[in-house]
């Protein structure tokens, strides 16, 4: 081994100093300009310092070509055999031996060796060259070596670079000594010439062209090197300069994606002066001869990864000062030169000294994965020279979670260990792991290797159309990935003739170098995955549909973060609500001119590409001029659910009983990264068994909405009816409690039962008797006791009369109804009727005794005892009831009560029996609580019927379509009965499509019918207005401002429906139903006569005119408030924050018939009620226990609502709504003062 040093290299003069530093210090930093000789001579100086005596000297290079060429150069200078004493190892080749002392390698190889040798015991010294590039591998090696040097004090580390922040490196390694070596350069004059007419992005391009034109007029010889940021800029400048400079100059492009032959032209200068247009590839990687002048735009396209959006961007940015100086140095390699910077000196001085390290702008997933696999600590605490941003670290962890490499605790999973040992990006590795499972590994090895290299397709400037045509032959509709596979299969098979392969690449405009690299990588991936030295299995035939789907599922396993849903032609919605464009070079991209012959697909008003897939995946999403999805393929959303279940978010809502299917179902939305993959009904018992069981019990068993043939169901239904009837007769507010006790009975016995099938299986296993309830299970007392107190029939005289009970406060039939034949009715007495139901006697006595004057009441104290005595011992017989009671009080308690002492009307109607007199055919003769009216009606029924017919012939009219009846009196005479006048009440009644004027036997009946009849007659009179109303509700456009028309309800509903689809609401009307309900609401609110009777033409016409004036305002209000209400509803359900029962609350405020029955005066408050629900949801999320306590307060009064008389229920309902606001969202305020005390008082007064 011959140690000699070329005298002409600047580093040779510093040899002694460097060798001594190597012996004395563990770490040294050598900063040398290009051409100083540091890369080739430092390894030899390490040999001279004796560092090879204890192990190998490892020399790393960022690029394989540099590692290979430098190792051969050093072997030649040492006069040894390359591959023996001096060798080189790269990712896919190892040209070293046992005798190797100088081992050149890429920095990635040394990083990989750490897995098997964490202490790097094979090495006595490590040289990290080109450290200024600050790649991920370099930063990771430096961090690991910093920790390792503490454990291995004998290990030497040499850090070298052309331009380097020497202070930072020295400080990072304990103020290591810095040795600076000058390069072989001539003076370079720097000129700052920013374009005077800078118009933004293109100003520097025009400036560069002018600078070139000026440079070529100078008498000096030498070539011109122009640094431009992008390939497009180079092509634009090439077109201009080729025409302007003429044949005396050669204008050449130079960028990374050029074909190899085109690149070689810049290294072989001819006789003509040259203008080389280059990207930043010419800064340090390549040595270009004969350059005398550099024109620098000061810009470059830099790769940046955005962790938040998982997007790799390639923005054009100003280069750092170190890069600008590197560019300038190119002009002084052969003699003095000039560098023209197309920016100001002030701009230069404001730029950072050094470029941002890759670790601060790259995807850290691979680094994190390998650190986990190598057990090197956490990335957050690793001693990087410039630690990566927290967002980048989180994104790296996020990607590894997505790939199934890490668990929720960031611990390595088995799949992660397998990924770490694959020599490629984790995304591609995940694809290969899935390919094992799908049995499509041969195809995936090809595709994964193809995705690991730059695009091999070339488009020479002079043959673009031919190249495009050649490349189209490889296209597979719907899949760029299969297009890669077809390209591979079209080529001669590996191992065949090299000449044939070269010809294939040339004819098809493919880079031979990249295609060769693709094959090498394919072979090495096969070695890694198959653990076999043989070539991977070949792809024998192009995959059929089934195999193609399996291939795409495997690819998708690595690209779950890059799925997207189609919005319109070539536009897709990706995760993070990003809008991405399909890259024009993709087979999925649809060109507008090609779309004309095919059918156009329009969804939601947006045109879709013909045949363009609804869902795609992309190998990468890159921001350039737009956000592009590159290398894409069509997918099915179900594939994403299958390969990425750990990423799926299942949102389940709107549970309900499916009577037809016999099970509890719910709406499920499956989302991934915010994109909805699936929506549909699922078995609710599978996801929330407890809640599903509750719904099953209430709907199927309690409400009877299921076909259940087991005996327990019929037995429990019969028992429930018996107990509820008893409680209804007793006018108990606890009727509903029977159902609740039955629910509790079932709930205590049933678990995980949410379908009829589940129930059948349970009954077969446990028996029918387990679910058969006894009376003690459902009632507080015995039903037989209730039956004795409230019998089904009573005997008056010798006649048994049926008795019916109704608990309908406020309605005419409320209370007790006894059905009496006409022939027996004239013999009834008040004593018989009033005291016939034993269960009501105590209440009747209590009401009457409490109504007596104070003198009598005090004489009977204690009053409760006297009431009990009356209920137990009083029997009026056939006497007048009140007279008999007065006699009883006098005889038993010595209290004298006169007839005048009983207040008139002291008994409420439900305590006064309602008598329904029927004739022999069962037809009603008269119904009344007044015995005198009954007697009179019975005695005069025969004569009265004739008089009624006469009155009906005079007044009744059918087929009314307009007001042709003039003015009608409130009542008319309809004969005599027992010397009393019989009255008939004329009213309007809807009769099919028309209206009829009909006589009614009672005023209330006439009023109730007239409300509907008047509305129907007004609709007929206002036929054109109704058409207008329905048209406006269908097509009126909503106002963005008060001066514009309001939106049509149809348009509003379309937007509302879309939002409601996101919230998967149920129980809502369709848009058509909503229009119908809205029209009903407008007419119900405006077409009313108050009072309804008497029927007067002037009042009817005034009502019609008033409605015509009010409808435009009402329509606008209905549309605006409906849209606002449903939008708020959708926002509440779609926001992801709900509380148990929230959907039921929304259905209560916005029921299926909304807004038909919604009070017009309550509309201004609806938004506040909905806002209160949202605030409740937010609070319930933080304090669920407190929410339950608040709900209990409201539930108490909600249960009271059914016991409030009908005429007061509406007022109590809205008072309760205000109470809800005060309990759950007090900060919103209430429309009226409300409190528990006020509700209690209202209930007592109403009840």
Image (tube, rainbow, N blue to C red):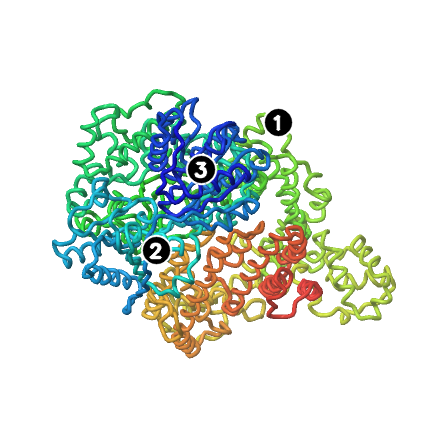
Q: Nearer the viewer, mark 1 or mark 2?
A: 2
Mark 1 = which residue? Answer: 766
Instruction: Name which of mark 3 and mark 2 comes first in the sequence.
Output: 2
In this figure, which residue is indicated by the disc labeled 2?
Answer: 316
Helix, strand, or loop for circle 2? Answer: strand
Give the number of the mark in front: 1 or 3. Answer: 3
- Residue 372 as seen in the image, left or right of residue 720: left
Residue identified by numbered label 3: 644
Residue at (85, 65) in percent of width and height? 895
| SS type, badge 3 | loop
Query: Residue at the spot x=62%, y=49% of the render?
Result: 802
- The crowd level at tag 2 (other Cα within 10 Å; few <14, some 14-19, many 20+) is some
Q: Quadrant of residue 1096?
A: bottom left
Q: Is residue 118 above or below residue 899?
A: above
Picture quadrant where residue 1109 is located? bottom left
Label 1–label 2 contact, CB within 8 A: no
Looking at this view, name the residue that lies furthest to the left: 247
CA distance separating discs 1 and 2: 74 Å
- Out of 515 and 487, give the one closest to the viewer: 515
Q: Whole-Å distance between the Cαs marked 1 and 3?
A: 40 Å
**Of the residues tagged 3 and 2, which is closer to the observer?**
2
Query: Where does residue 771 sit, x and y in percent of width and height?
Result: 63, 33
Q: Earlier in the sequence, mark 1 or mark 3?
A: 3
Q: Is residue 180 above or below residue 1017?
A: above
Quadrant for the N terminus in the image: top left
Q: Nearer the viewer, residue 992 or 439?
A: 439
């Amino acid at each position: 081994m011959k140690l000699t040093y070329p005298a002409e290299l600047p580093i040779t003069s510093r040899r002694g100093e460097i060798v001594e530093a190597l012996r004395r210090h563990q770490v040294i930093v050598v900063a040398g300009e290009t051409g100083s000789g540091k890369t080739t001579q430092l390894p030899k100086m390490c040999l001279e310092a004796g560092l090879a005596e204890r192990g190998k000297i490892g020399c790393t290079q960022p690029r394989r070509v540099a590692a290979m060429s430098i190792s051969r150069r050093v072997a030649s200078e040492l006069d040894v055999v390359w591959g023996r004493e001096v060798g080189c190892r790269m990712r896919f080749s190892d040209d070293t031996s046992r005798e190797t002392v100088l081992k050149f390698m890429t920095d990635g190889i040394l990083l990989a060796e750490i897995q098997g040798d964490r202490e790097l015991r094979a090495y006595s010294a490590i040289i990290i060259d080109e450290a200024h590039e600050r790649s991920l591998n370099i930063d990771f090696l430096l961090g690991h070596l910093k920790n390792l040097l503490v454990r291995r004090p004998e290990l030497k580390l040499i850090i070298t670079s052309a331009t380097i922040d020497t202070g930072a490196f020295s400080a990072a390694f304990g103020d290591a000594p810095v040795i600076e070596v000058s390069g072989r350069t001539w003076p370079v004059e720097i000129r700052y010439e920013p374009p005077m007419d800078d118009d933004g992005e293109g100003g520097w391009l025009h400036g560069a062209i002018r600078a070139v034109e000026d440079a070529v007029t100078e008498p000096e010889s030498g070539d011109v090197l122009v640094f431009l940021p992008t390939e497009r800029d180079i092509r634009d400048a090439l077109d201009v300069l080729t025409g302007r400079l003429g044949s005396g100059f050669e204008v050449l492009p130079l960028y990374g994606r050029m074909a190899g032959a085109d690149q070689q032209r810049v290294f072989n200068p001819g006789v003509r002066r040259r203008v080389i247009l280059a990207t930043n590839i010419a800064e340090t990687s390549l040595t270009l001869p004969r350059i005398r002048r550099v024109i620098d735009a000061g810009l470059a396209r830099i790769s940046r990864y955005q962790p938040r959006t998982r997007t790799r961007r390639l923005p054009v940015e100003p280069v750092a000062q170190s890069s600008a100086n590197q560019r300038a140095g190119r002009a002084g390699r052969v003699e003095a030169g000039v560098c023209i910077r197309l920016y100001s000196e002030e701009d230069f001085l404001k730029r950072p000294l050094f470029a941002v390290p890759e670790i601060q702008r790259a995807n850290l997933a691979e680094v994190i994965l390998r650190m986990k696999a190598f057990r090197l600590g956490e990335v957050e605490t690793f001693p990087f020279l410039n630690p990566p941003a927290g967002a980048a670290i989180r994104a790296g962890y996020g990607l590894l979670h997505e790939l199934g490499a890490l668990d929720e605790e960031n611990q390595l999973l088995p799949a992660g260990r397998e990924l770490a040992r694959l020599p490629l990006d984790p995304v591609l590795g995940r694809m290969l792991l899935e390919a094992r499972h799908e049995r499509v590994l041969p195809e995936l090895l090809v595709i994964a290797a193809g995705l690991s290299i730059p695009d091999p397709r070339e488009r020479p400037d002079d043959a673009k159309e031919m190249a495009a045509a050649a490349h189209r032959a490889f296209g597979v509709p719907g899949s760029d990935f299969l297009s890669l596979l077809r390209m591979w299969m079209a080529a001669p098979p590996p191992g065949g003739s090299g000449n044939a392969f070269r010809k294939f690449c040339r004819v098809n405009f493919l880079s031979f170098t990249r295609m060769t690299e693709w094959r090498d990588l394919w072979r090495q991936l096969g070695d890694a995955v198959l653990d076999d030295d043989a070539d991977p299995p070949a792809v024998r035939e192009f995959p059929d549909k089934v195999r193609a789907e399996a291939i795409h599922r495997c690819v998708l396993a690595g690209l779950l973060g890059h799925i997207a849903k189609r919005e319109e032609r070539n536009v897709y919605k990706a995760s993070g609500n990003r809008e991405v464009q399909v890259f024009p070079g993709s087979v999925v991209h649809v060109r507008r001119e090609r779309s004309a012959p095919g059918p156009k697909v329009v969804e939601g008003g947006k045109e879709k590409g013909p045949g363009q897939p609804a869902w795609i995946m992309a190998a990468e999403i890159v921001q350039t001029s737009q956000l592009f999805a590159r290398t894409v393929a069509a997918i099915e959303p179900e594939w994403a659910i299958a390969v990425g279940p750990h990423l799926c978010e299942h949102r389940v809502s709107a549970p309900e009983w499916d009577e037809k299917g016999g099970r509890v179902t719910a709406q499920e939305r499956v989302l991934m990264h915010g994109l909805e993959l699936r929506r549909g009904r699922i078995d609710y018992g599978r996801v929330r068994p407890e809640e599903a069981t509750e719904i099953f019990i209430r709907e199927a068993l309690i409400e009877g909405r299921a076909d259940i043939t087991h005996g327990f169901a019929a037995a429990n239904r019969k028992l429930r009816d018996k107990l509820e009837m008893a409680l209804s007769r007793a006018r108990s507010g606890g009727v509903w409690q029977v159902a609740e006790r039955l629910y509790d009975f079932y709930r205590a016995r049933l678990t995980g039962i949410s379908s009829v099938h589940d129930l059948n299986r349970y009954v077969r296993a446990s028996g029918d008797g387990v679910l058969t309830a006894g009376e003690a299970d459902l009632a507080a007392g015995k039903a037989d006791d209730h039956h004795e107190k409230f019998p089904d029939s009573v005997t008056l005289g010798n006649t048994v009369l049926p008795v019916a009970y109704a608990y309908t406060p406020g309605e005419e039939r409320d209370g007790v109804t006894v059905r009496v034949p006409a022939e027996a009715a004239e013999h009834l007495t008040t004593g018989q009727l009033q005291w016939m139901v034993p269960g009501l006697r105590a209440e009747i006595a209590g009401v009457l005794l409490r109504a007596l004057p104070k003198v009598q009441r005090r004489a009977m104290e204690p009053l409760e005892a006297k009431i009990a005595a009356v209920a137990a011992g009083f029997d009026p017989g056939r006497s007048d009831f009140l007279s008999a009671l007065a006699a009883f009080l006098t005889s038993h308690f010595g209290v004298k009560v006169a007839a005048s002492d009983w207040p008139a009307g002291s008994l409420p109607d439900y305590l006064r029996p309602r008598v329904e007199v029927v004739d022999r055919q069962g037809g009603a003769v008269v119904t009344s609580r007044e015995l005198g009216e009954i007697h009179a009606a019975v005695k005069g029924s025969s004569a009265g019927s004739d008089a009624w017919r006469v009155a009906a012939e005079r007044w009744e009219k059918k087929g009314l379509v307009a007001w042709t009846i003039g003015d009608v009196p409130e009542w008319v005479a309809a004969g005599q009965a027992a010397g009393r006048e019989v009255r008939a009440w004329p009213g309007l009644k809807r009769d099919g499509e028309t209206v009829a004027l009909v006589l009614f036997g009672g005023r209330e009946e006439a009023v109730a019918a007239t409300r509907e009849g008047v509305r129907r007659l007004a609709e007929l009179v206002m036929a054109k207005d109704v058409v207008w109303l329905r048209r406006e509700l269908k097509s009126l456009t909503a106002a963005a401002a008060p001066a514009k028309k309001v939106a049509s309800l149809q348009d509003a509903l379309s937007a509302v429906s879309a939002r409601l689809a996101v919230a998967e609401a149920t129980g809502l009307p369709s848009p058509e139903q909503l229009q119908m309900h809205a029209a009903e609401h407008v007419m119900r609110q405006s077409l009313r006569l108050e009072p309804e009777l008497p029927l007067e033409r002037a009042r009817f016409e005034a009502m019609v005119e008033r409605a015509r004036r009010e409808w435009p305002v009402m329509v606008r209000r209905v549309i605006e408030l409906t849209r606002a209400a449903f939008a708020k509803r959708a926002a509440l359900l779609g926001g992801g924050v709900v509380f148990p029962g929230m959907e039921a609350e929304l259905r209560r405020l916005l029921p299926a018939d909304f807004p038909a029955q919604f009070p017009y005066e309550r509309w201004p408050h609806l938004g506040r009620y909905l806002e209160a629900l949202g605030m409740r949801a937010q609070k319930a999320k933080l304090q669920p226990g407190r929410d339950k306590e608040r709900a209990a307060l409201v539930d108490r009064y909600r249960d009271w609502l059914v016991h409030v008389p009908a005429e007061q229920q509406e007022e109590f309902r809205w008072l309760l709504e205000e109470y809800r606001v005060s309990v759950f969202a007090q900060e919103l305020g209430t429309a009226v003062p409300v409190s528990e005390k006020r509700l209690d008082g209202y209930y007592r007064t109403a009840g």
